[in-house]
Amino acid sequence: MKKARPYRGKSFYKLMAAFFAVTFLCSLLILLQYLNGEKTRREETIRSYQSMVEKSMSNTADKMSLYEEVSVIISQLEGLDTLASAEYISLGSPQAVEFVQSYVDTVRFNLPSTDPPMFLYFQNSGRVFGKTAEEDSLENGTITEHFGMNIQTWNQLIQVGEEGACAIIHDPNMDFARFVYVREIYPHVVWIIGMEDQQVSEELRYSYLPEGAQTVFLTRNNQIITSKPADEQPELPFEFEQVASWPAFHMETWGGQSYFVYHQGFTNDTLQQIVVIPDEDSRDWITMILGSILITFAVTFVAGGALSYFFSATLYRPVERMVDALPLEKSCRDQSEFQMVASTVQELSKKAKTYENQLSSQSDLLATSLVTRLLKGEICLTPDIAEALGQCGFPTACKRFLVFVLLIDEEEEAEMPPTQREEAGNLLQETCRSFFLNGGFSSYVVADLDRYIGIVDLDGEEIEAVETCAKNMQTFAASELHMQVSISLSNEHILLNDLHDAYQEAMQVVEYHLLTGEYGSIGVYSRLAEVLSAGSGNREFLAQVNKLSNSIQSANYKQATEMLREIENAYTRHPAVLPQAQLQISYLTDSILLSLFDSGLDPELLKSLRCSDQLRQARGMESLCRRTRRIFDYLDTQKEQSRPQGKRIEPIIQYIQEHYQDINLSAGSVAEHFHMSLPVLSNLFKSELNIGFLDYLHKYRIERAKDLILHTDHTIGDISSMVGYANSITMNRAFKRYEGVTPGWYRQAASSHVPASGGEGKT
């Protein structure tokens, strides 16, 4: 019977549609990129226009400001007050000649080298002086004939107040206009200065503006002076009141042409400077968008169609033949060809990986679990377990053996990052196996939490030979791995059923070394049997003493008193035999004294308290704790009075503020720099500042970042590296945690005067 063939055609059209879609998306992305580039270019053009306009406006502001400054200087000239109050001023009088000459010299000295027409009008006397005191400019017709001003306009101008005003005078009988600045510079004295429109136009053209742009001066009498020659001026309707109501920048359309329009008011809003720039790209922008869309569709159909047909023809047919050969159930053949191939390959790959992982890890995991449970006495050594362990290399045929336990010193292990600690552990495990093998011993080593446990087949050798191998391992770990390790050895045993007993012996040696503080040592149970027979070491006791030492070194005497009370209660509830009790009391005494002398207290103070004599003369745990509490109470009182510990944290705070930009700054590096442990540093921050080290470091960095965000234009990424963060993501998280908002929102809120918590609540 002929094999049923899968449905053909559906996958082919799906593939064609997919290639069409991919091609369209690629074309669309290119179009969007192009449009975005054009948009960016247009925005840059607008920003460039705005910069040019600001320079032009600045020139005008400087010009008006110069007029105001000169008017102030004139108002301070000697003799002005006398002329201003006089009801009659004689032409050519010495007093008038002297003042007018001083006035003309002042104007020429402070204004550009041009010689503009200017007049001083004294209201009380009705006298008008130009550049000489010999004649009245109003009486001789200079103002009405040569300056192009009628009496009505003159009367309007001289009514100006102290704020000043601008006007443009365009006499229909003259072929030019004048720009006039008017201000009452002194009570009843008005100063008028003007420029011809040609000179004003030249100054307006001085600013750098794009081709086709023009600058316009518009005054309240709706007179205009423009930077364009008269024959090139477009018909642009400007009304002063309308222009004054416009925003500083907007778009206007005149005669079908779009313009960028900028304006600004000057001199008590009597003058509007308008800059008009044609928008030449507006029509091209629409044409470009339509053309780009048409090209996108054309490319999609041409390229997409060709690619779809090519790949369908080259991929679809081989896949079709592959599907025919797949071991598929009949119910699965309703799927498309690609789904059938993918599901089959995924299933086979998943089964292969699962089987491979099971084979590679099952033996080691099973052996490690069995050995650990055997050593701890959770299971017994049965023939089945012995067979399983024998296949993994466990020395099940050994006749004499011992158990060893290797520990990395706690301080060194605590400073290692988790990844480094794992790598060091794997290397130590291999080191143990290699050294025992080189020494002629069969061994099996497993890792159990923070220790490495192993069984060593003595094979006719003595324990001393194993101890020699242990010393070599210790030397290698110190020189090559830069780690200090302690190794404990049990007694020699014969039966594998004694594995648990051997493990207990080795652990008693470990606990003894922890109790006595003998780090980096090699201990053998047979040598310590007499001491260890009195009782086993107490790890809880060691942990409590360690916490007590940290409290003392950070000057937290209230917490140290509580810890001392816990130690005393535990000792009372579970009394040890005499040798062990004496060992615990001696260890506790030494720890307290060492912590007191390492805490930075004044040696003279400790000497006056006779701490060493007081504590070493104690008879029993109760006496030791009572004497110690008295010392703690006294030190706590002294601390409240003088707060010497504050002096200890000051250099740490200064060090953090000087090195906060260092990405590698951490609690470990600070503790190492000041020669203290991490718990002591942590307790010091909490007791003195009521804050953790990391919280203080993050808050200080965030404050520096806020200053940079508000007062610089640096990006958030640059600021994150400047304040000590590895990347902007880390700073964003810290900023959000402590400020409640992201750095970007903070900058945006500050620039727009919006409250910084806008839209986001603090966490």
Image (cartoon, rainbow, N blue to C red):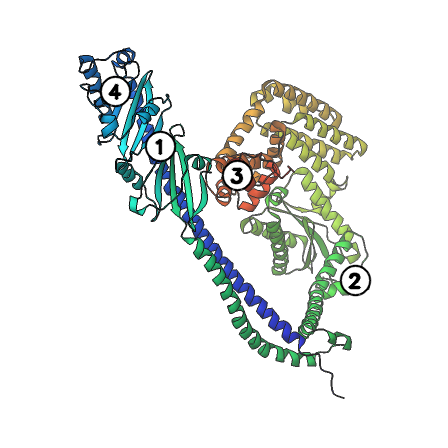
Residue highlighted by disc 1? 61
Q: Earlier in the sequence, mark 1 or mark 3?
A: 1
Q: Earlier in the sequence, mark 4 or mark 2?
A: 4
As measured in the structure, the alpha-carbon distance from the residue carrying label 2 to the one carrying label 3 is: 67 Å
Q: Residue at x 33, y 15 (%)?
A: 187
Label 1 element class: helix
- Specify few, some or many for label 3: CA neighbours under 10 Å numbering under 14, 14-19, or 20 or more: some
Q: Earlier in the sequence, mark 1 or mark 2?
A: 1
Observer-nearest of 571 and 659: 659
| Identity, as a three-letter code, of the amino acid under mark 1 | Ala
* Of labels 4 and 3, the one closer to you: 4
Label 3 element class: helix
Can the viewer see residue 546? Answer: yes
| Identity, as a three-letter code, of the amino acid under mark 2 | Ile
Can the viewer see residue 538? Answer: no
| Identity, as a three-letter code, of the amino acid under mark 3 | Arg
Q: Earlier in the sequence, mark 2 or mark 3?
A: 2
Residue highlighted by disc 4? 128
Observer-nearest of 406 and 228: 228
Residue highlighted by disc 2? 385
Q: Earlier in the sequence, mark 1 or mark 4?
A: 1
> Horizontal and vertical percent for residue 575?
79, 33
| Identity, as a three-letter code, of the amino acid under mark 4 | Val
